[in-house]
Protein backbone atom coordinates (compact mmCIF):
# COMPACT_ATOMS: atom_id res chain seq x y z
CA UNK A 1 0.00 0.00 0.00
CA UNK A 2 1.22 3.45 -0.89
CA UNK A 3 0.47 6.29 1.54
CA UNK A 4 0.63 10.05 1.33
CA UNK A 5 0.88 12.84 3.87
CA UNK A 6 -1.19 16.00 4.22
CA UNK A 7 -0.78 18.68 6.89
CA UNK A 8 -3.46 21.12 8.02
CA UNK A 9 -3.82 23.84 10.65
CA UNK A 10 -7.38 24.88 11.49
CA UNK A 11 -7.42 25.96 15.12
CA UNK A 12 -7.00 23.74 18.16
CA UNK A 13 -5.45 20.50 16.96
CA UNK A 14 -7.61 18.27 19.18
CA UNK A 15 -10.72 18.84 17.10
CA UNK A 16 -8.86 18.88 13.79
CA UNK A 17 -7.22 15.54 14.58
CA UNK A 18 -10.55 14.04 15.60
CA UNK A 19 -12.27 15.23 12.42
CA UNK A 20 -9.63 13.75 10.14
CA UNK A 21 -9.52 10.45 12.05
CA UNK A 22 -13.19 9.98 11.12
CA UNK A 23 -12.50 10.09 7.37
CA UNK A 24 -12.42 6.65 5.73
CA UNK A 25 -9.02 6.15 4.13
CA UNK A 26 -7.18 8.19 6.75
CA UNK A 27 -4.70 5.85 8.38
CA UNK A 28 -3.39 8.20 11.05
CA UNK A 29 -3.71 11.78 12.24
CA UNK A 30 -1.11 13.22 14.60
CA UNK A 31 -1.37 16.50 16.50
CA UNK A 32 1.74 18.64 16.40
CA UNK A 33 3.47 21.85 15.48
CA UNK A 34 4.80 23.18 12.19
CA UNK A 35 5.66 26.40 10.44
CA UNK A 36 7.86 27.91 13.14
CA UNK A 37 11.50 28.59 13.82
CA UNK A 38 12.30 26.46 16.88
CA UNK A 39 13.29 22.80 16.78
CA UNK A 40 11.15 20.40 18.79
CA UNK A 41 8.89 23.07 20.31
CA UNK A 42 6.80 22.44 23.38
CA UNK A 43 3.15 23.29 23.85
CA UNK A 44 4.11 25.99 26.34
CA UNK A 45 6.53 27.60 23.88
CA UNK A 46 3.96 27.55 21.07
CA UNK A 47 1.28 29.03 23.34
CA UNK A 48 3.69 31.78 24.40
CA UNK A 49 3.96 32.86 20.74
CA UNK A 50 7.75 32.58 20.74
CA UNK A 51 8.17 29.93 18.03
CA UNK A 52 5.94 30.90 15.11
CA UNK A 53 4.47 27.40 14.96
CA UNK A 54 0.87 26.54 14.21
CA UNK A 55 -1.02 23.79 15.96
CA UNK A 56 -1.38 21.38 13.07
CA UNK A 57 -2.34 17.84 12.20
CA UNK A 58 -0.28 15.56 10.02
CA UNK A 59 -2.59 13.17 8.18
CA UNK A 60 -1.39 9.90 6.68
CA UNK A 61 -3.84 8.60 4.11
CA UNK A 62 -4.32 5.93 1.50
CA UNK A 63 -4.88 7.75 -1.82
CA UNK A 64 -6.62 4.64 -3.18
CA UNK A 65 -9.34 5.12 -0.53
CA UNK A 66 -9.51 8.89 -0.09
CA UNK A 67 -8.43 11.67 -2.41
CA UNK A 68 -6.47 14.70 -1.25
CA UNK A 69 -9.36 16.86 -2.51
CA UNK A 70 -11.67 15.11 -0.04
CA UNK A 71 -9.29 16.03 2.78
CA UNK A 72 -9.30 19.61 1.56
CA UNK A 73 -13.11 19.60 1.70
CA UNK A 74 -12.98 18.36 5.30
CA UNK A 75 -10.49 21.12 6.13
CA UNK A 76 -12.81 23.83 4.82
CA UNK A 77 -15.83 22.36 6.63
CA UNK A 78 -14.30 22.21 10.11
CA UNK A 79 -13.22 25.81 10.59
CA UNK A 80 -13.77 29.41 9.54
CA UNK A 81 -10.96 30.24 7.10
CA UNK A 82 -11.77 33.96 7.26
CA UNK A 83 -10.63 34.33 10.87
CA UNK A 84 -7.04 35.54 11.14
CA UNK A 85 -5.05 33.86 13.92
CA UNK A 86 -8.07 32.48 15.73
CA UNK A 87 -10.82 29.91 15.66
CA UNK A 88 -13.81 30.49 17.89
CA UNK A 89 -12.59 31.22 21.42
CA UNK A 90 -8.99 30.22 20.60
CA UNK A 91 -6.89 33.29 19.79
CA UNK A 92 -3.26 33.44 18.72
CA UNK A 93 -1.01 32.84 15.74
CA UNK A 94 -0.79 29.14 16.63
CA UNK A 95 -4.48 28.84 15.66
CA UNK A 96 -4.03 30.20 12.14
CA UNK A 97 -5.61 28.57 9.12
CA UNK A 98 -2.98 26.94 6.92
CA UNK A 99 -2.44 24.16 4.44
CA UNK A 100 1.12 22.87 4.46
CA UNK A 101 1.61 21.20 1.10
CA UNK A 102 3.70 18.16 0.28
CA UNK A 103 4.65 18.70 -3.37
CA UNK A 104 3.43 20.63 -6.36
CA UNK A 105 0.26 18.59 -6.91
CA UNK A 106 -0.97 19.32 -3.39
CA UNK A 107 -0.07 22.99 -3.76
CA UNK A 108 -2.08 23.29 -6.99
CA UNK A 109 -5.04 21.44 -5.47
CA UNK A 110 -4.91 23.57 -2.30
CA UNK A 111 -4.84 26.84 -4.23
CA UNK A 112 -7.73 25.75 -6.46
CA UNK A 113 -9.77 24.67 -3.43
CA UNK A 114 -9.05 27.96 -1.63
CA UNK A 115 -10.21 29.90 -4.67
CA UNK A 116 -13.45 27.86 -4.78
CA UNK A 117 -13.92 28.31 -1.03
CA UNK A 118 -13.56 32.09 -1.32
CA UNK A 119 -16.83 32.14 -3.30
CA UNK A 120 -18.61 30.92 -0.15
CA UNK A 121 -17.48 33.88 2.00
CA UNK A 122 -18.01 37.61 2.01
CA UNK A 123 -14.80 38.18 3.98
CA UNK A 124 -11.41 37.20 2.54
CA UNK A 125 -10.15 33.67 3.14
CA UNK A 126 -6.89 34.13 5.08
CA UNK A 127 -5.67 30.54 4.86
CA UNK A 128 -1.95 30.29 4.21
CA UNK A 129 -0.80 27.77 1.62
CA UNK A 130 2.89 27.02 1.99
CA UNK A 131 5.28 24.11 1.49
CA UNK A 132 5.29 21.80 4.50
CA UNK A 133 8.28 22.40 6.76
CA UNK A 134 9.30 19.91 9.42
CA UNK A 135 6.44 18.65 11.56
CA UNK A 136 6.98 18.10 15.28
CA UNK A 137 4.52 15.74 17.01
CA UNK A 138 2.93 17.29 20.09
CA UNK A 139 3.33 15.82 23.53
CA UNK A 140 1.66 12.44 24.05
CA UNK A 141 -1.17 13.85 26.17
CA UNK A 142 -2.36 15.81 23.10
CA UNK A 143 -2.59 12.72 20.87
CA UNK A 144 -6.12 11.31 20.45
CA UNK A 145 -7.18 13.79 23.11
CA UNK A 146 -10.93 13.35 22.63
CA UNK A 147 -10.66 9.56 22.64
CA UNK A 148 -8.78 9.69 25.94
CA UNK A 149 -10.68 12.49 27.66
CA UNK A 150 -14.03 12.88 25.97
CA UNK A 151 -15.26 16.33 25.28
CA UNK A 152 -15.65 18.38 22.20
CA UNK A 153 -14.25 21.43 20.53
CA UNK A 154 -15.86 24.48 19.01
CA UNK A 155 -15.59 22.85 15.60
CA UNK A 156 -18.37 20.52 14.62
CA UNK A 157 -17.20 18.23 11.84
CA UNK A 158 -19.82 17.12 9.41
CA UNK A 159 -20.31 13.42 8.89
CA UNK A 160 -17.64 12.05 6.55
CA UNK A 161 -18.52 8.37 6.61
Image (cartoon, rainbow, N blue to C red):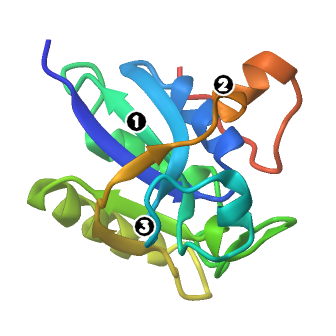
Q: Is 52 positioned to the left or the right of 60 in the image?
A: right
Q: Residue at x 34, y 71 (%)?
A: 129
Q: CA distance from mark 1 to mark 2?
A: 13 Å
The residue to which callout 1 is attached is 59
Please tell me in which quadrant of the rendered image residue 19 appears.
top right
The residue to which callout 2 is attached is 144
Q: How many C-alpha atoms fall within 10 Å of the one at disc 1: few (<14), some, or many (≥20)?
A: many
Upstream in the sequence, badge 3 or badge 2? 3
Q: Is 27 positioned to the left or the right of 151 in the image?
A: left
Asked whether residue 76 is in view, the answer is: no
Q: Mark 1–mark 3 contact, CB under 8 Å?
A: no
The residue to which callout 3 is attached is 35
The residue closer to the viewer here, 131 or 107, is: 131
SS class of the residue under badge 2?
A: loop
x then y, percent, for residue 71: 40, 42
Please say if 58 is above or below 133: above
Q: Residue at x 55, y 68 (%)?
A: 97
Amino acid sequence: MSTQTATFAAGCFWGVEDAFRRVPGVLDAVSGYTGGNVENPTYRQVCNHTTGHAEAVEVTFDPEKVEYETLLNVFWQIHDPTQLNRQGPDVGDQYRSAIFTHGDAQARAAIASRDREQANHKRPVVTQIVPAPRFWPAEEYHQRYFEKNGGACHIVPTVHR
